[in-house]
Image: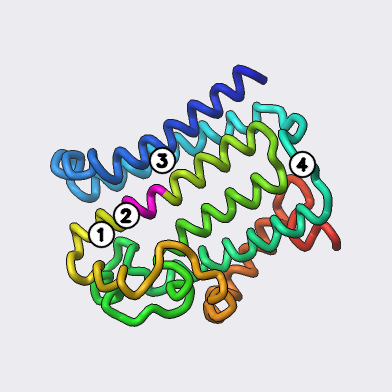
Amino acid sequence: MVDSLASLIAASVAFVGTHFAMSHPLRAPLVKVLGAGGFMIAYSLVSAACVAWMYFAFVATPAGAPLWGDYGDAVWMVASIITLVAMVLFAGSFVGNPALPAPGAEKAALREPSGVFRVTRHPMMWGFALWALAHLIAAPTARTVVIALAIGLLALVGAHLQDRKKEALMGDAWQRWEAKTSYWPRFGKVVSAGPIAWVGGLAVWLGASWLHAMDAGVWRWV
């Protein structure tokens, strides 16, 4: 277990480290050498390799006993609700998101926030962070803690760094977007995230929890 857990830690460090490095200090020099298309291919290959390494190291590491707490239904219910909110934010982040590298991003940043962007300007990142929190609550085994901390760190620090990068790339448009939105989620606005976010989020939540290795979400009580 020690060797496989060490491999999982190394894979998680590599995953987070390469994402930060290739998204920020190494991005410009790599784009200059490889071109925009070549950079995206290299970025995708490195990311895929790290994810594969994490997956196989995770599977090879025995689950072991929880480091704290237990698997009681109350804990699972709280974690399931947090995961549902995470999936709603994630699903809604694909519609009108000025942070995505897509045509019209600058124009989107000048609009009034709607949907999940009334909750936070980083719905995708907070979706990952809340997913990580839910797993820390429901299944705090050594291997899950490693994965959850890596994903949570990448999401929250990455969101902050993304603001800095977008300020440099989009200037006034992103600064206006920042003034109209919040880094920290306003969870009271989740209920008004819109039908696309809720329908998509519910679908992902139900599907992912059904495929889970352990009974999770609503399937735990069905």
- Of marks 2 and 4, which one's residue comes earlier in the chain? 4
The amino acid type, in three-letter code, at marker 3 is Ser
For label 4, the residue is: 69
x and y, in percent, of residue 124 in the image: 46, 60
What's the residue at 65%, 27% (across, down)? 60
The stretch in magenta equals 157-162
Dots 1, 4 in contact, CB < 8 A: no
The circle drawn on residue 47 is 3
- Mark 3 / mark 4, whichever is N-terminal: 3
Q: Nearer the viewer, mark 1 or mark 4?
A: 4
Discs 3/2, front: 2
The three-letter amino acid code for the residue at tag 4 is Gly
Please say if 103 is above or below 110: above
In the foreground, 5 or 167: 167
Residue marked by disc 1: 166
**Residue 200 percent across, percent down from the top left:** 57, 71
Nearest the eye: 196 or 158: 158
Q: Which residue is mark 2?
A: 162
Categorize mark 3 by other alpha carbons within 10 Å: few (<14), some (14-19), many (20+).
some
Say what amino acid the circle numbered 1 marks: Lys
Mark found first going from the N terminus, 1 or 3: 3
Spatial CA span between label 1 and label 4: 40 Å
State how far apart marks 2 and 4 are (Cα). 35 Å
Name the quarter where the N terminus is drawn: top right
